């Protein structure tokens, strides 16, 4: 079975600073990787996903993530954050070729952007 | 645009009541899910359905049941609500394609008193 660890439960940053939200996964087989964002009082929406190919994936709102197979990581980055990026971010994994719908989520990282 | 609609955003129910949470998607997706979200625990899968009248238990099915009579609609049922079922419930759907995006509704906040 696969698992996901988000290494920081909370990340406070100042506006226009860079940010990295860390995600590690474990799986005995190849995986698909996702980052979802949840704004206050809303559902989750997809930021980006890695299926195959280039290990650097670009998503919406200026976010990007890098898949590192040797370190089993999929960290999310943004070079300059805005107040509007304040939200909870979830990393998720599903097994390649298996039941795609069985996404396993991490426990989330609350990003707070301060002025 | 993709749409997953949860009929009730906020509910307050009494202990022992039967509770129905309804979810409708307009994307002709085969797969639908119910997750529960609690602070510090992330999202946990309660049940999912991969076709009409088909269902499978997720990680925390105890105290819940589901119904899928039509492809677009997936209902979560709490037979006898308890205070430890106070939570945010998220419905989601996706096509049966490897790596496909899962789309979420806006969530239903349930308080059991």
Image: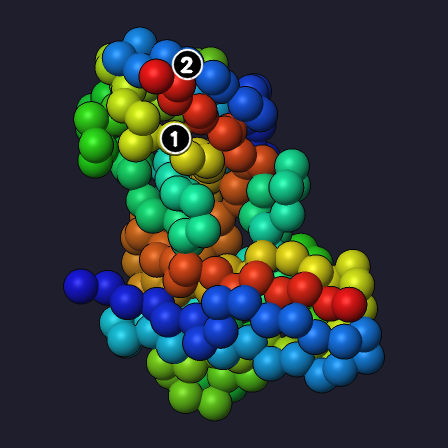
**Secondary structure found at label 1:** loop
Assign the N terminus of chain B to one quadrant of the image.
bottom left
Locate residue A113 relative to residue B45 in the image: left or right.
left
Check the image and report above or below for B99 versus A6. below
Q: Position of residue A26 (x, y in %)?
A: 56, 28
Towards the viewer: B69 or A8: A8
Tell me which chain the residue with mark 2 is part of: A
What residue does disc 1 label? A86
Determine if marks 2 and 1 fall on one subunit.
yes
Towards the viewer: B4 or B113: B113
Towards the viewer: A22 or A66: A22
Per the rendering, the mark at residue A57 is: none
Locate residue B85 relative to residue B43 in the image: left or right.
right
Check the image and report above or below for B3 versus B99. below
What residue does disc 2 label? A13
Tell me which chain the residue with mark 1 is part of: A
What separation in Å lies between label 2 and label 1 (alpha carbons)?
10 Å
Instruction: Tell me, yes or no, whether the two marked residues, 2 and 1, touch with CB atoms within 8 Å.
Output: no
**Sequence-wise first label, 2 or 1:** 2
Q: Residue at x 47, y 17 (%)?
A: A12
**Secondary structure found at label 2:** strand
């Amino acid at each position: 079975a696969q698992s996901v660890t988000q290494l920081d439960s909370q990340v406070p940053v100042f506006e226009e600073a860079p940010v990295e939200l860390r995600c590690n996964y474990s799986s005995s087989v190849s995986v698909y990787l996702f980052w979802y964002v949840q704004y206050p009082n809303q559902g989750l929406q997809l930021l980006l996903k890695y299926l195959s190919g280039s290990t650097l994936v670009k998503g919406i709102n200026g976010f990007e993530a890098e898949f590192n197979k040797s370190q089993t990581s999929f960290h999310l980055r943004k070079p300059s954050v805005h107040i509007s990026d304040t939200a909870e971010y979830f990393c998720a994994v599903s097994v390649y070729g298996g039941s795609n719908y069985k996404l396993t989520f991490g426990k989330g990282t609350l990003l707070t952007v301060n002025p | 645009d993709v749409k997953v609609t949860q009929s009730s955003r906020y509910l307050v129910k009494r202990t022992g009541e039967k509770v129905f949470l309804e979810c409708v998607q307009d994307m002709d997706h085969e797969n639908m899910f119910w997750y529960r979200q609690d602070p510090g625990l992330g999202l946990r899968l309660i049940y999912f359905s991969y076709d009409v009248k088909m269902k499978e238990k997720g990680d925390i099915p105890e105290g819940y049941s589901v119904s899928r009579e039509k492809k677009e609609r997936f209902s979560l049922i709490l037979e006898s609500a308890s205070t430890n079922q106070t939570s945010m419930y998220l419905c989601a759907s996706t096509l049966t394609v490897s790596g496909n995006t899962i789309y979420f509704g806006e969530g239903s906040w349930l308080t059991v008193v």
